[in-house]
Amino acid sequence: MSRTSDQPRRALLSVSDKTGLVDFARQLKALAFEILSTGGSAAVLREAGIDVTDVSSVTGFPEVMGGRVKTLHPAIHGGLLARRGTDDRVMNEHGIGWIDVLAVNLYPFEATIARSECTLDDAIENIDIGGPAMLRAAAKNHARVLVVVDPSDYERVVDGLTSDEPAALREQLAVKAFAHTASYDAAISSFLHGQYRSEELFPDSLVLGWKRAQTLRYGENPHQQAAFYRHADTPGTIAGATQLQGKPLSYNNLADADAALQCVKAFDETACVIVKHANPCGVAIAATPLEAYQRAYRTDPTSAFGGIIAFNRPLDEATAAAIVDQQLVDVVIAPEIEDGARAALKQKKNCRVLETGSPERISTATTRSWDLKTVEAGLLVQQRDVGTLADVEVDIVSRRQPTDAELEDLRFAWIVAKYVKSNAIIYAKGGQTVGIGAGQMSRVVSARIGALKAADEGLDLRGAVMASDAFFPFRDSIDTAAENGITAIIQPGGSIRDQEVVEAADEHGLAMMFTHMRHFRH
């Protein structure tokens, strides 16, 4: 809206992220704006030779309490909230000047709490008060005020100011501002809940602050629209990964890549996990990434076609070359992709290559991490399944004791079972999966499928071990295992037919362990 000549347009710029600030201010100056600013922003602008009016000279009150109070004043909020044709008399009566553009991004609270040395006092001092208040005021009054929270929008704002400030731009920026303050408050709420109410895992109100990382081509199916949101760029996660090459990641790519990465991070040893449709189809540990990959691939080359491959060690040239020569792959994931590996993978131009940084080790220290699942009109929230054998007292319930080699394979198979859809059966030998039965309605059918897959690939189950994510309701799976040469079994126990199942193991001379911990995965 136009102004009279004695009412210069004004912009208030007060930002933590100074990216593009100087250029933005210069462009506003070229449009005859008066620039108001505070603290560090004002200093940066003055250093760049831009004339700035301090907010304190507008309010008639100095910044006090170490900057805690500087913009909370009617001269500022009146200038943001005033409506043309409604509040003119009040503005004139109290000598309040109009503010037409507000650029604010908030104290870096999330970056502060992400630092390992952050104290509670540090976090609290980085809770912005005046910034959110101004943003909400400007966004509420977006019919008159342009509000910008993202430096990437500065150019759009300048273009809008030179083209009669289209209403659509004002509306878009207002929505973005409210989302910005909501996400900021969510981060504060989550952090303080952990500090002050840590014994209460689930708050009365669950406030989530997620930011859109990308809009996806489509969802699980082409007729579904989709997007990917994240709340932090955490090293060792898919959300924090850097894509080095390949087409944009799809919805299914992201889901499968996360499944592969979660599984491979669970191993201390050098490991490779190959995933297809959210289920591991091959997992192995070995002395080198190359050997781990070859052994994982050997489990089920048919399912590995077009799959996701994850490593928990840097990917070297030899391993990357083997992948290129051996299979079609959609995504390759590793904490680091070495130069030779990058060059080798370029031969697969459509393959997405993700470098995650150092994986975060899965441990009981992450039990406050939530696993979220939607239902219609609701949200299911649970702790992530970070349980390991170190967290339970394992019982050997059979007459025969497992050998040391069997114990190692039982531990390996138990880790894999946690990442396979229920009902899950894992056959393993020598630190390698040799058969996987996943996602069946009947556990005995999963056991048969795992054995069939091993037979299809010419893998010998004799001397292998078996892991089950949940208890055996009947002895039929034990009989199937014995028929295929399985020598040891690990399972949670807890069935009303446990005695019958243990007796079956003893009849066949199998070793059996109860973990007393279930790993359902739906």
Image (tube, rainbow, N blue to C red):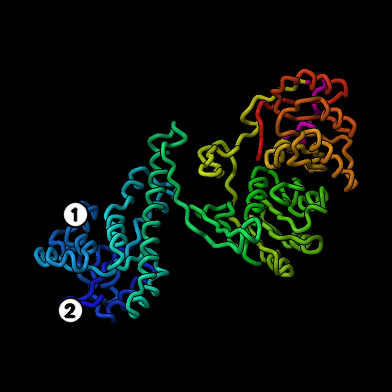
Q: Nearer the viewer, residue 192 or 346?
A: 192
Q: Main secondary structure of the magenta part?
A: helix
Chain-order first, disc 2 or disc 1: 2
Q: Quadrant of residue 267?
A: top right
Q: Amino acid at mark 1?
A: Val
Local secondary structure at mark 1: loop
Q: Which mark is residue 418?
A: none
Check the picture and name the quadrant holding the N terminus.
bottom left
Question: Does the stretch in magenta take in 476?
Answer: no
Using the image as rendered, state which of residue 149 and residue 311 is in the foreground. 149
The mark found on residue 64 in the picture is 1
What residue is at 75 percent from the left and 27 percent from the top? 472
Residue 121 seen in render: yes
- What are the residue bounds of the magenta stretch? 398-412
Is residue 28 left or right of 155 when viewed as pictured? left
On screen, 415 above or below 239? above
Crowding around mark 2 (Cα neighbors within 10 Å: few <14, some 14 to 19, many 20+) is few
Q: Position of residue 161 (x, y in %)?
A: 32, 77
Provide residue 115's location: percent of width, then percent of height.
44, 50
Identified by mark 2, the residue type is: Thr
What residue is pinned by disc 2? 4
Label 2: element kind: loop
Task: Tell me the mark number nearer the camera, choosing from 2 and 1.
Answer: 2
Q: Are marks 2 and 1 in contact (CB under 8 Å)?
A: no
Residue at mark 2 to residue at mark 1: CA–CA distance: 35 Å
In the image, is residue 400 part of the stretch drawn in magenta? yes
**Neighbour tally class for label 1: few under 14, some 14-19, many 20 plus, Cα within 10 Å:** few
